[in-house]
Amino acid sequence: MTQFFNSLLSQQDFLEQYWQKKPLLIRQALPSFESPISPDELAGLACEEDIESRLIEEYGANGQWQVTRGPLSEKDFARLPETHWTMLVQDVDKHMPELQYLLDPLRFIPDWRCDDLMISYAPEFGSVGPHTDSYDVFLLQAMGTRHWQIMDQPIHEVVLIEGIELQILQEFKADQSWELQPGDMLYLPPHIAHHGVALNECMTFSFGFRAPKKIELLDAVVNGLLEKSLANDLYADPDLSIGQYAAEIDQQAVARIKQLLHQAIDSAEPILASTLAKFVTETKPSLEDLAAEFVTEPMTLEQISLLFEQGKELQRNLYLRFAWLKNKQGGLFFMAGEAYFVDKEAVQFLPLLTEKAVLNQQDWFLMQNNSSLTKVIALLIAEGGWFWLLD
């Protein structure tokens, strides 16, 4: 697939000049692009029970900026006016594996940062209002024309319209504006206020890139310390001196606590990488039930080999997240917040297990002689990380 960047702006140039720094409009990032999914197909996804979707009406029967959460129904669509509404469906890249290729041009950004492909459909004047996002997003125009307005500087303290479910800015004054045609793309760093309005029937593909919050990482580190029985040191004050008041917590005590917490973080250094990997591979709550549908009975290595010999192939479960890292003993493979150890010889195959969508007999032939790796693969199949493709 064509890359979004060319000789005039390489991927490295983009990272250095724009990523998490400033917006970028890329005209014809994908020249002559045609949406691989129709509005009717998107509406069909929005009607399914386990798929996260929303319907946003600027002038709904129950008030302005009315939100209806999926699954949507024929009645929801039947009552809609001709204009001023938007349908959004999350994780379309996972529900429709054939759309995974759309993520390929963005693979230079670490996979663990990628959240999902959200697709929106809107008739004329459809919008979700001026707002900010806490994540990086690439907005690819897939059908029709959308008018985008943005503010140049990030907003970290927003003032929102009260009394509605959506987080829409009370005030929005655009610094730049464009009309995007199919194939055009707009990149926005976190906290850049933006407002998109459909000028006709249109679809927009939103590639979102998440980042963990400090409090989430601290919580993950604390849980890691507890699991490893680290940082159990008690508060100590061998330098205690007589104070003026018995009930006062003086600044020396606060300084000791601060030092104790710094020491706790330092003691977590050996587990920081694995703690991060477990955290970023946790399954999205909205996808847990769908991911669990692929859990199966354990298989022996002989049974797995036989199926490969019969021409069967394994498909990676797209509802789950994967990562890996090296350590002194070998490597760790992560799936759904769990870690699996492999020896040093198996580390070379971890990129294959985390990035390839389908494993075939040739892949198995390369890996089958490493016992630590094949045992992990058997576990991954049983736990639904990989499943056999049907004929």
Image (cartoon, rainbow, N blue to C red):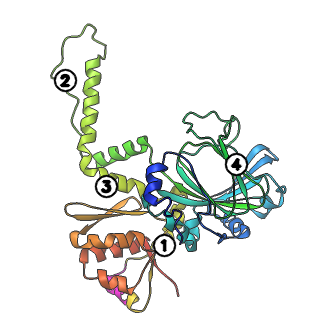
Q: Identify the residue under disc 4.
A: 128
Query: Is 211 situated above or below 340?
Result: above
| Residue lying farthest to the front in this orientation | 8
**Residue 37 or 76: which is nearer the viewer?**
37
Type of amino acid under label 4: Val
Q: CA distance from mark 3 to mark 2?
A: 33 Å
Type of amino acid under label 2: Asp
Q: Which mark is residue 294?
A: 1
Q: Identify the residue under disc 2.
A: 237
Q: CA distance from mark 1 to mark 4?
A: 35 Å
Work out whether mark 1 precedes mark 4 in sequence or the reverse, and give the earlier one.
4
In the rendered image, residue 262, in percent from the top left (x then y), is placed at 27, 35
In the rendered image, residue 77, in percent from the top left (x then y), is placed at 79, 60
Q: Residue at x 44, y 48 (%)?
A: 212
Residue 71 visible in image: no
Instruction: Indicate which label's residue lies in the foreground, 3 or 1.
Output: 3
Q: Identify the residue under disc 3.
A: 274
Category of crowding for the residue at label 3, using alpha-carbon neighbours closer than 10 angstroms: few (below 14), some (14–19), many (at least 20): many
Magenta region, residue range: 299-306
**Residue 57 or 180: which is nearer the viewer?**
180
